[in-house]
Image (spheres, grey):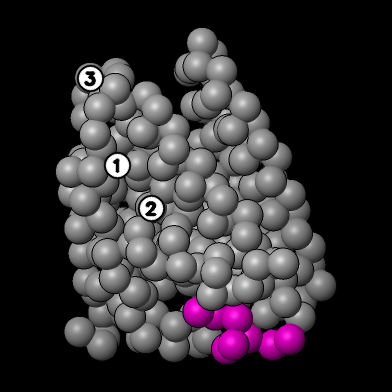
């Protein structure tokens, strides 16, 4: 069985830097929002995978990976909604953080280049989720910590799947493009955010 350290090693190597500690402090202060937005993130991740399947029906490898990913993300969504119910928290849609939009605004306009960029962005979103799950585990109550620990392996695999598909469909070396998005991603993570969300930056009050 893989240890947390073994699972996280490729994730931490891929990301350009860690989540700042103030985000974790805010997560503990806003656990209801954390859980609600986590559910929303799982739902959006499943939707993203399904959209890729619908748009790229000739790409067999993508269809297979995204089908598996969508099923897993929907299962995670169901699990988070069940936790919300157990804790008496009403599920609701929340306004999105600037994180995903901040990455996607840099996606290329040409179709094939856009697909590679979308897949790279997906890899960063999944990797950051995995890193934050791991960081939250020692801070949360036992039941929630156990659930977040259980997500690490699948989230790590998701980031690797996205990255492998980006490499497959690029027709060349994607290292420079991956690095560009990595720098953008870290800037979104370390810069101040007015609202707390699962993928938000540091609380604006700490800046």
**Residue 139 falls within the magenta-colored stretch:** yes
Give the image location of residue 198, x and y in percent.
Answer: 47, 66
Q: Residue furthest top?
A: 58
- Is there any visible trace of residue 105 in the rendered image? no
Find residue 87 and report its horizontal and vertical position in percent.
76, 76
Q: Quadrant of the C terminus?
A: bottom left
Which residue is denoted by mark 2 in the rendering?
A: 124
Front residue of this view, candidates 178 and 93: 178
Q: Position of residue 9 (x, y in %)?
A: 46, 68
Residue at image position (54%, 48%) is: 158
Which range of residues does the magenta coloring cover?
Answer: 134-142
- Residue lying at 54% horizontally and 13% vertically, measured from the top left: 57
Residue 18, which numbered label?
none
Judge whether residue 2 is colored magenta: no
> Of the numbered discs in the image, which one, if any, rests on residue 104?
1
Identify the residue at horizontal 51%, vertical 10% (top origin): 58
């Amino acid at each position: 069985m893989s240890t947390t350290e073994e699972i996280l090693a490729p994730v931490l190597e891929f990301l350009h830097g860690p989540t700042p500690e103030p985000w974790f402090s805010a997560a503990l202060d806003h656990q209801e929002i954390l859980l609600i937005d986590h559910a929303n993130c799982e739902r959006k991740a499943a939707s993203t995978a399904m959209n890729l399947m619908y748009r790229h029906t000739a790409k067999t490898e993508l269809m297979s990976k995204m089908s598996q990913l969508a099923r897993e993300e929907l299962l995670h969504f169901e699990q988070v909604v069940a936790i919300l119910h157990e804790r008496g928290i009403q599920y609701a849609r929340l306004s999105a953080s600037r994180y995903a939009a901040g990455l996607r605004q840099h996606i290329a306009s040409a179709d094939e280049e856009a697909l590679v960029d979308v897949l790279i962005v997906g890899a960063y979103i999944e990797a950051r989720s995995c890193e934050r799950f791991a960081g939250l585990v020692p801070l949360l109550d036992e039941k929630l910590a156990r659930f977040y620990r259980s997500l690490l392996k699948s989230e790590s695999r998701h980031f690797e799947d996205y990255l492998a598909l980006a490499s497959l469909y690029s027709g060349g070396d994607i290292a420079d493009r991956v690095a560009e998005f990595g720098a953008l991603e870290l800037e979104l993570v370390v810069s101040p955010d007015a609202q707390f969300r699962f993928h938000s930056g540091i609380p604006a009050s700490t800046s």
